Image: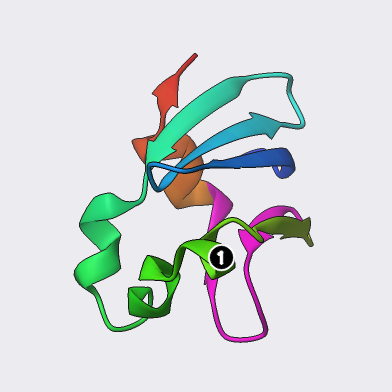
Amino acid sequence: MTPDVVEVKPLPDYCLETVFENGERRWFDMKPLLTCPAFSALTEQNLFMKAYIAYGTVVWNDEIDLSPDTLYLRGRPL
C-alpha cells in the first residue's frame, strides 16, 4: 500500500517535493500533466503554488488533486 503524503512543497518550475508518512522524500515533475484537461488550470502559477495536503494526498482545490500512488510510484527519490 502506498504511504500517504504528509508534506508538500510546490516549486516555481511546476515540480513538487513531497514527504511520505514512511519518511521518504520524492520529487515529482508536474509539467507533463499540465497538458491534460484535468490539470490545465495549474498552469496558473498562483494556483499551482497553493498546493496543500488533504486526506493523504496533494490537492489544489475541490476539483484538482493528485493521487499518492502517482506521486510515490512516478516520483524520483530525493
Q: Name the residue under label 1.
A: 46
Which colour style is shown? rainbow
- The percent position of residue 47, horizontal first and vertical second, equals 56, 69
Q: What element carries label 1?
A: helix
Which of 54 and 12 lies nearest the eye of the viewer? Answer: 12
Residue at 74% in and 53% down? 56
Report x, y in % for residue 78: 49, 13
Check if residue 58 falls in the magenta segment.
yes
Task: Assess disc 1: are there few (<14), some (14-19) or many (≥20) residues with their C-alpha within 10 Å of its C-alpha.
Answer: few
Location of residue 46 in the rendering, given as x and y in whole percent from the top left corner? 56, 65
Which residue is painted at 29% across and 65% down in the image?
A: 34
Q: Which residue range is magenta in the image?
A: 56-68
Residue 22 at least partly seen? yes
Note whether residue 1 is visible: no
In this view, 51 is above or below 77: below
As drawn, 72 above or below 70: above
How many numbered discs?
A: 1
Residue 58 horizontal/vertical position (percent): 63, 57
Q: Is residue 11 left or right of residue 29?
A: right
Residue ID at (63%, 19%): 24
In this rendered view, identify the residue nearer to me: 23 or 36.
36
> Residue at the spot x=20%, y=70% of the render?
35
Left or right, residue 62 beside residue 17: right
Q: Does the magenta stretch include residue 63?
A: yes
Q: What residue type is labelled 1?
A: Asn
Quadrant of image for the N terminus = top right
Choose top left, top right, bottom left or bottom right for residue 9. Answer: top right
